[in-house]
């Protein structure tokens, strides 16, 4: 197993109220697996991704990467680990406006000190048919192009696990289908596990496994 969650819980305090978003969620992710997290808005899907990826701390439970507990690591310890082991794809792209497409793609590798960052970025942009757009800034790209750049950025360090939060949610149906097909093809080529949050039954139908979240708990594991 690459990643394991043990009894993960998350509670937020708003004034005098405590809201439990996740309630003792346990799961395992295997190498190369495509797992979909499904559920209604507010069921805890995005919160689960942020906890599993170390972007936030759980209120209870543990997260293990390759059997090592990463739950209590400091941000200084987590940042290089996240950069090396995980890739992230978000619904709203999260590209840096002042960087070109190529610079956005290469950024995680450059942060890791990889001297081949730019060459690897060029290779990925060629793979997704954006070579001619490599010097364009995000404002000059369509939604589908931005998401392809984001996919390349997520793959630049050859991560073992990719987290994708509604990656086709802001795209039209044709662009969304193309982006999903590209993501699945690149994931197979890199043998990365993929954990994808979506409301789409069509996307869920392509997954190796679907987890359904309801009120912060896994209620179905088909």
Image (spheres, grey):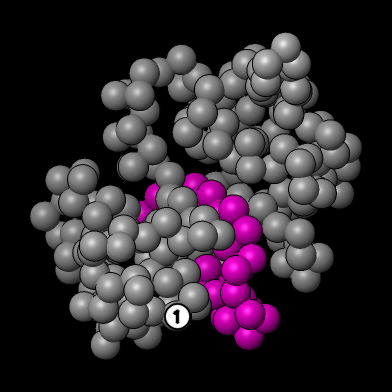
Residue nearer the viewer, 38 or 95: 95
Magenta part of the protein: which range? 158-183
- Residue at left offset 51%, top offset 60%: 92
The one nearer the camera, 142 or 78, is: 142
Q: Is residue 87 visible?
A: yes
Is residue 22 or residue 123 the one in the foreground? 22
> Please, which residue is most extreme toward the top here?
16
Q: Position of residue 87 (x, y in %)?
A: 43, 50
Decide: is 109 above or below 78: below
User: Residue beneath label 1, please?
Assistant: 142
- Spot occupied by residue 31 in the image (x, y as percentages of width and height): 55, 47
Quarter occupied by the N terminus: top right
Residue 175 colored magenta? yes
- Whether residue 134 is situated above or below residue 120 in the rendered picture: below
- Specify whether residue 149 is painted magenta: no
Measuring from the top left, give residue 182's x and y in whole percent: 52, 75
**Which residue corresponds to the image point at 50% horizontal and 36% vertical from the top-left?**
53
């Amino acid at each position: 197993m690459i990643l394991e969650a043990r009894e993960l819980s998350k509670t937020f305090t708003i004034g005098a109220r405590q809201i439990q978003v996740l309630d003792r969620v346990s799961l395992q992710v295997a190498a190369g697996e495509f797992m979909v997290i499904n559920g209604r808005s507010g069921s805890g899907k995005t919160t689960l991704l942020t906890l599993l990826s170390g972007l936030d701390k759980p209120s209870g439970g543990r997260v293990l990467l390759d059997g090592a507990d990463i739950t209590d690591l400091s941000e200084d310890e987590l940042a290089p680990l996240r950069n090396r082991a995980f890739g992230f794809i978000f619904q709203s792209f999260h590209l840096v406006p002042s960087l070109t497409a190529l610079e956005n793609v290469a950024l995680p590798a450059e942060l890791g000190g990889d001297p081949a960052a730019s060459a690897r970025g060029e290779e990925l942009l060629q793979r997704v048919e954006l070579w001619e757009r490599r010097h364009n800034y995000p404002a000059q790209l369509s939604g589908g192009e931005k998401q392809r750049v984001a996919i390349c950025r997520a793959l630049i360090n050859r991560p073992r696990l990719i987290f994708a939060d509604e990656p086709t949610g802001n795209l039209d149906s044709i662009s969304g289908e193309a982006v999903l097909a590209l993501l699945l093809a690149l994931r197979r080529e890199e043998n990365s596990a993929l954990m994808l949050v979506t409301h789409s039954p069509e996307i869920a139908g392509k997954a190796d496994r679907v987890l359904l979240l309801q009120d912060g708990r896994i209620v179905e594991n088909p």
